Amino acid sequence: MTAGVVVLGATGDLTARYLLPGLAHVAQTVPGGLRLVGVANDDLDTAGFRAHVHGAVARYTPDGPDPEVAALVDAAAWVRGDVTDPATLAAGIAAAGVDDTDPLVLYLALPHGLFRPVVEALAQVDLPSGLRVVVEKPFGSDLAGATALNAALGRLLPEDGVFRVDHFLAKQTVLNLLGLRFANRVLEPLWSSAHIESVDIVFDETVDAQSRAAYYDRSGALRDMVQNHLLQLLTYVAMEPPTSTSPADLAARKADVLRAVRTPDRDHVARWTRRGRYTAGTVAGRAVDAYTDAPGVDPARGTETYAEVTLHVDTWRWGGVPFRLRTGKALAADRREIVVRFREVPHRVFAGEAPARNELRLQLDPDRMSLDLNVNGIGDPFALETVTLDTELARQDPTPYGQLLLAVIDGDTRLSAHAAEAEEGWRIVEPVLAAWADDVVPLEEYAAGSDGPA
């Protein structure tokens, strides 16, 4: 089996940072080899694209490119043209040179506004039976757009040929949620509102938006992170036990969670959400300009760089438990974790202050897992102290993007979002976006390098 990977937008930042290093890690594991085709409108030839591939892998792979990367570079081909032109797409597919039944991945590493034009152009191309179409987030810019894009993709391919990828789902800690919950008798009986008080899903970043500001200003933290990444993490935390780990079973349980999330009305948005935008400051000793001073930013848009949304999952298991989703840029520290906070013990046996609440923390980068427990103290045996059981999880090999690419080549949709998940995500965040646009929630300011809005 030879696999072909045709990347539309082959010279973009996403391709250089993530796709090409991911392909370099997995190319030699594909039986029969992997053929890479880059498609874009840049003034390049095949030699220029091969140099670009080698340079990107060298720059964004910590230990530099392995010798095996040479095979990927040597087999790379280049097609110059408009990615919304059926002739360009046909040329890209032909350049991959794979048999009709071999897997052919068409990766849309493009601005989301080009997704539908590309899909509609593909409808005019003779497509191989082994085609898989990969769409990066954000999947549309609103519910209507996501629904229309799903419909266009549905006319082109069956659902198992569409991959709405989210590299968060390939992170080791996220995958470990399945094993942690459904392979341990000790934990799953506690996994409900009877024992859990709240859940925080946090992705704080010290990085600012400067290098991506022109794109980011048309997106913002809520669209860029909450609508897809953090809601996907929510589904793994809150899903009911699936009957198996098959793609169909996992997709069904994840969609059930999102359908159960209460649609935020304006009162909910006013009470349970916050938004902010960073001003000039210092992050880890580095001076950071205000977001509004970044190239390509229109201050009048009021784009948020910090978003916090508390959601409620209206099911028997989770009634009354707040799920707080939070993300921000240019903050004081990188904090990427899921925190499950358990309720107080029902009766205090020990004198003094109430025992600290048990917390289970799943850190996403680096991958770690820790659990806070109360034990008897060393000095006074009837006093309590809190200890943390902590373990570092094995580092992934290949990287999350490498895992994604292997799954797509294998036709495994478990690391992707189903059509219903994409639409439900927009159903949840659209009322928040609308209320924020009407200033129901003020746009707060916070200094770069701080902990966020006061």
Image: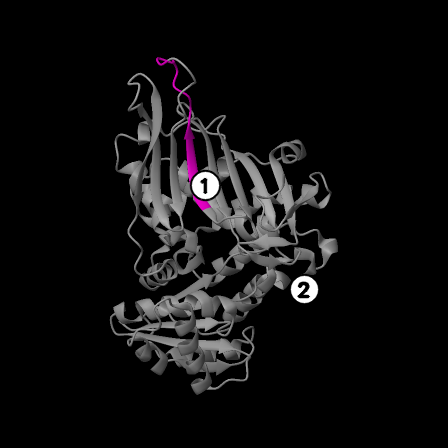
User: Tags 1 and 2 in contact by the CB under 8 Å rule?
Assistant: no
Q: How is the image coloured?
A: one colour
Q: Is residue 21 magenta?
A: no
Categorize mark 2 by other alpha carbons within 10 Å: few (<14), some (14-19), many (20+).
Answer: some
Q: Which residue is mark 2?
A: 296
Labelled disc at residue 234? 1
Q: Position of residue 342 (x, y in %)?
A: 41, 27
For marks 1 and 2, the one nearer the N-term is 1
Q: Where 217 falls versus 355 (above or below)?
A: below
In space, the residues marked 1 and 2 are separated at their CA atoms by: 32 Å
Residue type highlighted by circle 2: Gly
Categorize mark 1 by other alpha carbons within 10 Å: few (<14), some (14-19), many (20+).
Answer: many
Residue type highlighted by circle 1: Leu
Q: Between residue 109 and residue 445, name the one nearer to us.
A: 445
User: If the image is split into quadrants, where does the N terminus sit?
Assistant: bottom left
Q: Residue at x 40, y 51 (%)?
A: 365
Which contiguous range is marked in magenta?
Answer: 336-350
Q: Position of residue 237 (x, y in %)?
A: 40, 38
Say whether residue 443 is left or right of residue 22.
right
User: If the image is split into quadrants, where does the C terminus sit?
Assistant: top right
Q: Position of residue 331 (x, y in %)?
A: 56, 49
Q: Residue at x 48, y 37 (%)?
A: 200
Q: Quadrant of residue 376?
A: top left
Q: Is residue 349 magenta?
A: yes
Q: Which is in the foreground here, disc 1 or disc 2?
A: 2
Say whether residue 186 is left or right of residue 287.
left
Q: Between residue 122 and residue 305, name the one nearer to us.
A: 305
Secondary element at tag 1:
helix
Q: Does residue 208 appear in this view?
A: no
